[in-house]
Image (cartoon, rainbow, N blue to C red):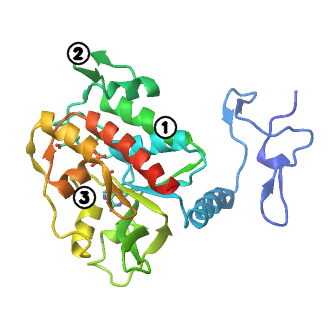
Amino acid sequence: MAPALTLENTQLDAASTLSLKATGAAQPEVRENYEGQYQFAPIEESQVARAMIKRYFNTMYERAVSDVVIVGAGSAGLSCAYSLATRRPDLKITIIEASVSPGGGAWLGGQLMTPMVIRKPADGFLRELGVPYEDEGNFVVVKHAALFTSTLLSKVLAMPNVVLMNATAVEDLIVHEDYSGKQRVAGVVTNWTLVALNHDTQSCMDPNTITAPVIISATGHDGPMGAFSAKRLVSTGLLKELGNMRGLDMNRAEPAIVNGTREVVPGLILTGMELSEHDGSNRMGPTFGAMIGSGIKASWEATRILDN
Ligand code: 48N
């Protein structure tokens, strides 16, 4: 049996990268040594730093031009990403999420209670994801909202054509004008969220950009940046005024948002609760079927635009 790998039988080479030159030792693996204690392969701190830096900034460089940018990784944004990435593995899909923890409002069912209600026919998406639920007739109940969101998130993140940049905020839209003077959203302006939330405390922290032919905004109606793109359309003059989300009516709200999901200005699709702020449709409260349906509809809108 090869001798246990210890720091003594490794050596630093010129690039100060630890190369494991233990005589006869295979690549180390975590295993019990003779004393029954786990022994990790040795590492240099710089290896950890470089492993992250290389990958993250390569991704930023590569995704500076994306095919589709999805703003917001809540239930609508993630449902959209899943539907789009499974149907179109050729597309470079970049998700920008302001929070450190993606998932938006879908970690809880309502008033901090954990079960999640999803009205039929959106339960079909749960079967596609393999999320178990209890059937209550016209609706189903997932035992914990986090079971839905973590399952969806894990599948989206596992897709090779999807990149998620969390803790990153969209703080403006890129708007180009074509030869006829028609304006088109052509990308997003990004910054680290902690920077975007602190422009009042430190001036001149300029942003970065990601260009893409299609932007799907799913920024919800809540939180410090809720309905961001819809509000930005008003402040840039691309939309006269917000419709402002109406009171709660589950039966009116859910079909209105799914069927209303669309390209609201050239290059920009709104989905999920952000659309209710744009259109002035009702809110539905603690039921998530419309977020799934709207996200899926947004993914089809995106491919309609890209394929035309
Ligand atoms: O979950 P949300 O807020 O939004 P949706 O539309 O995916 O789902 C809405 C749903 O949770 C409800 O509100 C339910 C159905 N209740 C309805 C009701 O009547 O009360 O996710 C939006 C995500 C969040 O994670 C935000 O952090 C993120 O978008 N976000 C942004 N990310 C990047 N840049 C921004 N400017 C930005 N603004 C919000």
Residue position marked by numbered label 2 in the rendering? 136
Given residues 88 and 217, the one toward you in this image is 88
For the point 27% across and 21% down, the residue is 140
Number of numbered discs on residues: 3
Given residues 240 and 57, the one toward you in this image is 240
- Of the residues tagged 1 and 2, which is closer to the observer? 2
The amino acid marked with disc number 2 is Glu
Distance, label 2 to label 3, CA atoms, is 32 Å
Q: Residues within 10 Å of mark 2 (few under 14, many from 20)?
A: few
The amino acid marked with disc number 3 is Ala
The amino acid marked with disc number 1 is Ser
Q: Locate residue 151 relative to residue 58 in the image: left or right.
A: left
Name of the residue lying farthest toward the right: 24
x%, y% of residue 218? 33, 52
For the point 53% across and 40% down, the residue is 87
Q: Residues within 10 Å of mark 1 (few under 14, many from 20)?
A: few
Note whether ligand 1 is within 8 Å of mark 3: yes
Counting residues from the start of the chain, the first of labels 1 and 3 encountered is 1
Residue position marked by numbered label 3 in the rendering? 227
Residue position marked by numbered label 1 in the rendering? 154
- Of the residues tagged 1 and 3, which is closer to the observer? 3
For the point 38% across and 49% down, the residue is 73
x%, y% of residue 303? 48, 50
> Based on the displayed image, in which of its 4 quarters is residue 171 positioned?
bottom left
